[in-house]
Amino acid sequence: ETGVTQTPRHLVMGMTNKKSLKCEQHLGHNAMYWYKQSAKKPLELMFVYNFKEQTENNSVPSRFSPECPNSSHLFLHLHTLQPEDSALYLCASSGTGLAVEQYFGPGTRLTVT
Amino acid sequence: AQKITQTQPGMFVQEKEAVTLDCTYDTSDQSYGLFWYKQPSSGEMIFLIYQGSYDEQNATEGRYSLNFQKARKSANLVISASQLGDSAMYFCAMKPYNAGNMLTFGGGTRLMVKP
């Protein structure tokens, strides 16, 4: 596989469930990101990892827990979510530098019931 | 803090015509990069074009060009010869030089190409 992949593509979970989103990049990048995209709202950066170290946590509630075991894999662990957490969750990766673009995965469409 | 404004929530364009999508930004940084992304209904964000704040020429990538006016803090995307496959959401984003890898996105413009 090439590029950035995300699994699952769709997820429906209850508020008491625990689930995880997975992201994998095959581009040799050092930085990985989680974004949340809700309807009618700008894309919101959630977490940034550089060389497996978390460098940004954009005031995300603790019910979202990221994990970056290596520079190719990124997880987002979910527990006791709220209906307002329903959104498209996008993973991205990039190199470092001003002019480098981020490469995005196809996203996971999450519905919390 | 940075702010990106895309004032056109939705636009129509006739197939084969050109269209301009507006983007203005607000930053106190002198060095920054500007990006445009396309998001089809499938959800994936696709990088289109990049403009650096110190680039003297407007960026071009195939049918995409960026009309960069630094003094006005605008970075409009021009798509020439629109195709049906151009129908999608388009997002403008900015990254200051000192912001590490953090991109700030605008609210997006939905472009619909009419046959």
Image: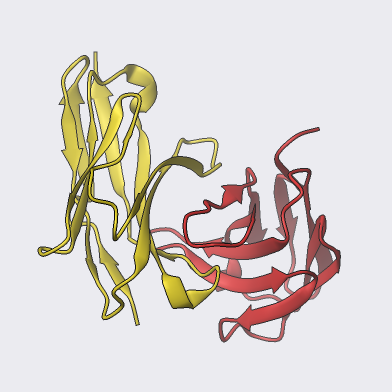
Q: Which residue shows up at 23% across the image and 57% down it?
A: B6
Q: Quadrant of the C terminus of chain A?
A: bottom right
Residue A11 image offset from top left, x and y in percent? 73, 52
Residue B16 image offset from top left, x and y in percent? 21, 14
**Residue A113 visible in the snapshot:** no
Chain A's colour?
red
Image position of B98 with respect to B45: above or below:
below
Q: Which residue shows up at 79% across the image and 62% down it?
A: A74
Q: Quadrant of the N terminus of chain A?
A: top right
Chain B's colour?
yellow
Image position of A17 with respect to A96: above or below:
below
Q: Is residue A32 left or right of residue A1?
A: left
**Residue B71 visible in the snapshot:** yes
Residue B13 image offset from top left, x and y in percent? 17, 27
Q: Is residue A53 left or right of residue B58?
A: right
Q: Quadrant of residue B38?
A: top left
Q: Depth check: A33 or A84 in front? A: A33
Image position of B10 with respect to A65: above or below:
above
Image position of B38 with respect to A76: above or below:
above
Q: Which residue shows up at 33% across the image and 59% down it?
A: B107
